[in-house]
Amino acid sequence: MKPVVRWLVAGTVTIGAFALVAWVCGAVILTEFMKDPGVRWGVAGAVGVAVAALAALWGQSFATAEGTSKAASCDAGRTTVPGSESGDTGNIISGGTFHGSVIQGRNISLSQPTSSCLCDTSRAALPQDRGSEGQG
């Protein structure tokens, strides 16, 4: 179902819930308890708004729900990259093979952790350090 149709259904259910509950409360249920029509319809409107709020919560989740299809369930574990029609991406980078998207950059400097840091202080090999590897 298209998202526009889902939103229209959600809006229609919300408006219908408000109108039905407000009318039933104002015209049928509260006539026995409240004789003043101003007060009766005010309370009926408040009850209608409360029910419509619950209907709107349902409607939002209904309208934004992803449809499950066979194709979507088959591709659940794959990483798709924009511009890659197959969805299978493999990148060979020094240090291993990575499946999926890899963000790369140039001239990235790493700051050294302070002595108060409790993390691993071993320094990763930077691109400028790799030039001297294997030469000797």
Image (tube, rainbow, N blue to C red):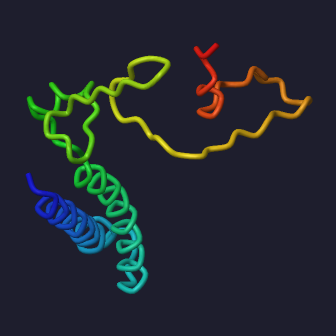
The outermost residue toward the front is 136
Q: Is residue 111 left or right of residue 131?
A: right
Asked if 30 appears above or below 117 in the picture, the reply is below
Between 94 and 40, the one lying in front of the other is 94
Q: Is residue 60 left or right of residue 68?
A: right
Residue 131, given in percent of the width and then of the height, sits at 59, 27
Residue furthest toward the right? 115
Quadrant placement of the C terminus = top right
Vertical comparison of 73 with 60: above or below: above
Q: Quadrant of residue 2?
A: bottom left
> What percent of the width, then of the height, locates residue 29?
29, 65
Q: Can you give x and y, in whole percent of width and height, for residue 93 in the image?
A: 43, 25
Q: Quadrant of residue 99?
A: top left
Horizontal side of residue 65 vs 69, given as left or right:
right
The residue located at (36%, 35%) in the rendering is 101
Q: Residue 86: percent from the left, percent from the top?
A: 14, 34
- Look at 61% across and 44% down and name the residue there: 108
Q: Quadrant of residue 100?
A: top left
Horizontally, residue 99 falls left or right of residue 103, namely: left
> In the depicted view, which residue is nearer to us: 35 or 84?
84
The residue closer to the viewer here, 117 or 48, is 117
At 33% across and 67% down in the image, what residue appears?
A: 48
Residue appearing at x 66%, y 25% in the figure: 124
